[in-house]
């Protein structure tokens, strides 16, 4: 198989890879860096919010259901507290009302793949 066919095959598979695709997506990480996510979160240790690795572990990582992804995206947009009180001492997650559902779902998928 020559390189051109490999490239076409790779593009054709992209929509199937879901969470795994968002995981390595530098666009999603850059969107998060331009927002305020990393002020309160780090991938591997607790800051104000829980470590993204711990969030991924709790919600079954890349095996998370669409319902979980939608719930996490809702929390990113609306903010809230109560799920991580033991880790955070009750600190709230701030709302991001200008963020679209699609952007928030991409971020949720990126986090789940950590
Ligand atoms: C002001 C600090 C702060 C900022 C900014 C922040 N978070 Fe959070 N985040 C938290 C805290 C605190 C929690 C734990 C909330 C709880 O106990 O339910 C949390 C929880 C979460 C969770 C887990 C939700 C759950 O219910 O288990 C996700 C996912 C998340 N944040 C993603 C993000 C993303 C993406 C951004 C950027 C758009 C962001 N956070 C910005 C503080 C923050």
Image (tube, rainbow, N blue to C red):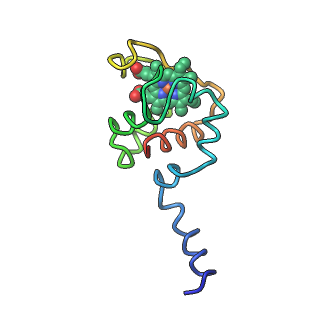
Residue 8 is left or right of residue 43, and the answer is right
- 94 in relation to 41, above or below: above
Residue 104 is left or right of residue 56, and the answer is right
Residue at coordinates 47% horizontally, 19% vertically from top-left? 48
Residue at coordinates 50% horizontally, 28% vertically from top-left? 41
Residue at coordinates 45% horizontally, 13% vertically from top-left? 91
Q: Which of the 4 image quadrants contains residue 34?
A: top right
- 83 in relation to 114, above or below: above
- 4 in relation to 70, above or below: below
Quarter of the rendering occupied by the N terminus: bottom right
Circle count: 0
Residue at coordinates 61% horizontally, 81% vertically from top-left? 3
Q: Check the image and name the residue furthest to the front.
A: 45
Give how far across and how far down residue 59 sits, in percent: 34, 38
Q: Check the image and name the residue furthest to the bottom.
A: 1
In the image, 15 versus 111, the foreground residue is 111
- 26 in relation to 71, above or below: below
Give how far across and how far down residue 29 sits, in percent: 59, 42
Residue 37 is left or right of residue 86, and the answer is right
Specify whether residue 78 is in view: no
Give how far across and how far down residue 24 sits, in percent: 53, 52
In the image, 18 versus 51, the foreground residue is 51
Specify whether residue 111 is in view: yes
Quarter of the rendering occupied by the C terminus: top left
């Amino acid at each position: 198989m020559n390189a051109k066919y490999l490239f076409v095959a790779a593009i054709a598979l992209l929509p199937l890879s879901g969470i795994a695709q968002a995981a390595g997506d530098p666009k999603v990480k850059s969107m998060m860096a331009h927002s305020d996510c990393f002020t309160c979160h780090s991938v591997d240790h607790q800051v104000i919010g829980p470590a993204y690795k711990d969030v991924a572990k709790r919600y079954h990582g890349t095996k998370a259901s669409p319902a979980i992804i939608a719930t996490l995206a809702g929390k990113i947009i609306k903010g809230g507290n109560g799920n991580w009180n033991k880790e955070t001492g009750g600190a709230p997650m701030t709302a991001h009302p200008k963020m679209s559902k699609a952007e928030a779902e991409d971020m949720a998928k990126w986090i789940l793949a950590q």
